[in-house]
Amino acid sequence: MQRLECERMFVAVMETGSFAKAAARLGTGSAQASKLVSRLESDLGVRLLNRTTRSLSPTEVGQAYLERIKLVLEELDALDEAVKNRSGSASGRLRLTVPMSFGTTQLAPAFIDFASQYPDIDLDVSFSDRVVNLVDEGFDAAVRIGTPADTSLIARKLCGARIVLAASADYLSRRGTPETPADLAGHDCIIDSNFRDPLVWHFRVDTSGEANTVKVVGRLRFSSADACLSAAEAGLGIARVPSFMAGPRIRAGRLKPLLRAFEDQALGIFVLYPPNRHLATKVRVFVDFVVQRFQGEPAWDQGW
């Protein structure tokens, strides 16, 4: 077991490029990571790494060993998962990465229910809008909004994420209600900088097939949909945010939806995981759980 620990650490160091990142992935400290790799080199009687103050790189024999030992460890992990799957038990540590806003508002309650249903699974969730490499950083699965860029991952759609415009009744009574996207030029727009191009607002493609976009301006710019909605509710302008954030405030009457006839196509929300011949039971039951949880019309889009 100690030799396996050393080999897994060597692979993690090579995949992450540092002892610190490898240690974080495997839940230990940098000093222990270095010690494990040194022990492996001592056992083998060869130097596997070239170490400098700025970088790590494999020696020629280290590269050859890396390629072979990765296959061995993958086969061993696959064997372990096959045995666990046969027993039908869902257990172990499940590492997930999910978007901040959607994660905290919509996924968190689902995680609580999942944890209650599967008491033998240790749930470790990272709430972040940073797009991570699942394999390199040791995550079992991810939830992401928009078409997945990494085609090597398996993707299952959870639901759609509409992008909507909303403003308070007070603002609209003072400034008027826009009837077309072009009318936004005369309005204060609240900018959500989480979007790839936050100053360009997209609407439904017109009958000619041309993209319908409007460049907007505004003195308020937040990297938080919740902050944008709070500003809109205070009468400071028009916000453009995902409906899973705006829905509760619109349903409560605190904000009014705008330009619904021009609404762009909804983005997809997906659960992603690496392909594996023997998918771990803990991953399979989680994926099935969230897919079932979000099937049908999302609750946040109902009632308005």
Image: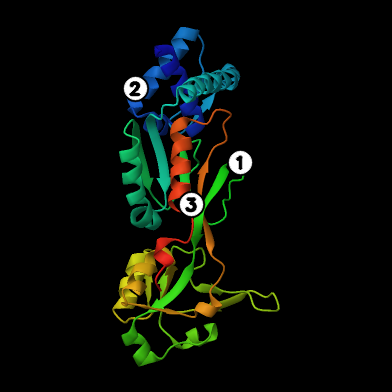
* Identity of the residue furthest to the left in this view: 234
Could you say which is closer to the camera, residue 122 or residue 40?
Answer: 122
Q: Are marks 1 and 2 in contact (CB under 8 Å)?
A: no
- Amino acid, disc 1: Ser
Q: Residues within 10 Å of mark 1 (few under 14, many from 20)?
A: few
* Identity of the residue furthest to the right in this view: 208
Asked whether residue 17 appears in the rendered view, the answer is no
Q: Which mark is residue 152?
A: 1
Asked whether residue 287 appears in the rendered view, the answer is yes
- Amino acid, disc 2: Gln
The image quadrant where one finds the N terminus is: top left
**Tag in front: 1 or 2:** 1
Q: CA distance from mark 3 to mark 2?
A: 33 Å
Q: Earlier in the sequence, mark 1 or mark 2?
A: 2
- Amino acid, disc 3: Arg
Report the residue marked by disc 3: 144
Could you say which is closer to the camera, residue 193 or residue 257?
Answer: 257
Report the residue marked by disc 2: 32
Q: Residue at x 57, y 42 (%)?
A: 154
Q: Residue at x 49, y 58 (%)?
A: 296
Q: CA distance from mark 1 to mark 3?
A: 15 Å
In the rendered image, the vertical position of residue 255 relative to residue 31, given as above or below: below
Residue 241, horizontal then vertical, whole percent: 43, 68
Q: Earlier in the sequence, mark 1 or mark 3?
A: 3
Asked where in the image residue 72 lies, by quadrant, the reply is top right
The image quadrant where one finds the C terminus is: bottom left
Q: Earlier in the sequence, mark 3 or mark 2?
A: 2
Q: Residue at x 37, y 55 (%)?
A: 106
- Could you say whether the residue bearing mark 3 is in a helix, strand or loop? strand
Residue 266, horizontal then vertical, whole percent: 53, 65
Residue 123, horizontal then vertical, whole percent: 35, 37
- Could you say whether the residue bearing mark 1 is in a helix, strand or loop? loop
